[in-house]
Amino acid sequence: GAAVWGLPLVNAYNPMVAPDYTRMVGMTGQPLATVGEAPATEWVADFNSPLHDLLGLRWVLAEVPFPGSSAADEHLHMAMRESVMPRVMTPQGVRRHAGAFPEPADFAKTDFATTLWLATEDNSACPDAGGGQADVEVLLVQPSHIRLRYRVDSPGWVVINELHAVGWEASAGGTSLPVLRANGLFRAICLPAGAGELVLRYSPWALWKAGVRLHLGRERRPLQEPAGLIS
């Protein structure tokens, strides 16, 4: 039903969901009968979680009443969330986390308008503090293609609040730029100083190459698991 109305789903059954999404957001084995059945995780205690703000969860819908809901009709109860964050953000500071995800307690207190989380091992031309303040205009958003116009006086961050995955590639002025995993699930790119267009595309070919590298790594080191990947 959500797809018919163009509503993105962020908490529902999906057999193709990524393990990192399941770990942070949670997922039930079946569609939810009530809002209270939504699984809690360390990062998502309820639908007021900052992670749901980043995911763009604006509406919570259910067939029965729940706290904060109003009746749309006799079969549908709904609540609108006002704290949703923009799809594109330009924080200037970085906090680092060891392991795959930020610590839940620290994550919950983050001001995501000014700060993003990156893994300790991620390197970038952007500084962790005092990055450039980018002015960004969204030109195109498609499932596998995003274009932004930007201007920034010194290297600065842009965070796109859509799920990161192997296969996303970015470029500006014909130069490839790393796409980093930000805030546990999303995409961050360090913009070079100046003005231009940032282009992001999803490449199945890049995903295939990553799979080949993983397979070859397992053949050569059968007792070792590549760091940062989940089987």
Image (cartoon, rainbow, N blue to C red):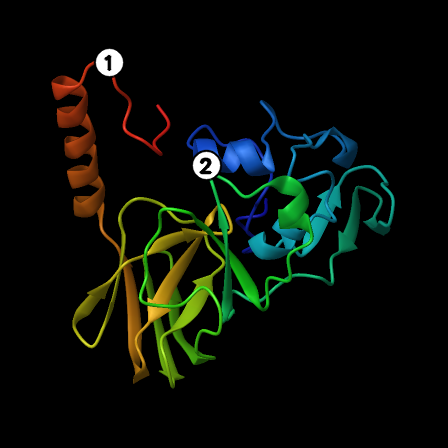
- Indicate left or right for 145 with 94 as reference: left
Residue 161: mark in rendering: none
Query: Is residue 17 visible to the viewer in this orientation of the structure?
Result: no
Image height check: is 207 above or below 58?
above
- Mark 1 in CB contact with mark 2 (< 8 angstroms): no
> Residue at point 45% right, 31% down?
19
Residue at far top of view: 223
Percent from the top left, x then y, of residue 157? 42, 69
The image quarter in which residue 47 lies: top right
Q: Secondary structure at mark 2?
A: loop
The image quarter in which residue 29 lies: top right
Q: Which residue is mark 2?
A: 99
**Nearer to us in this view, 204 or 126:** 126
State which quarter of the image contains the C terminus: top left
Percent from the top left, x then y, of residue 229? 34, 31
Residue 223: mark in rendering: 1
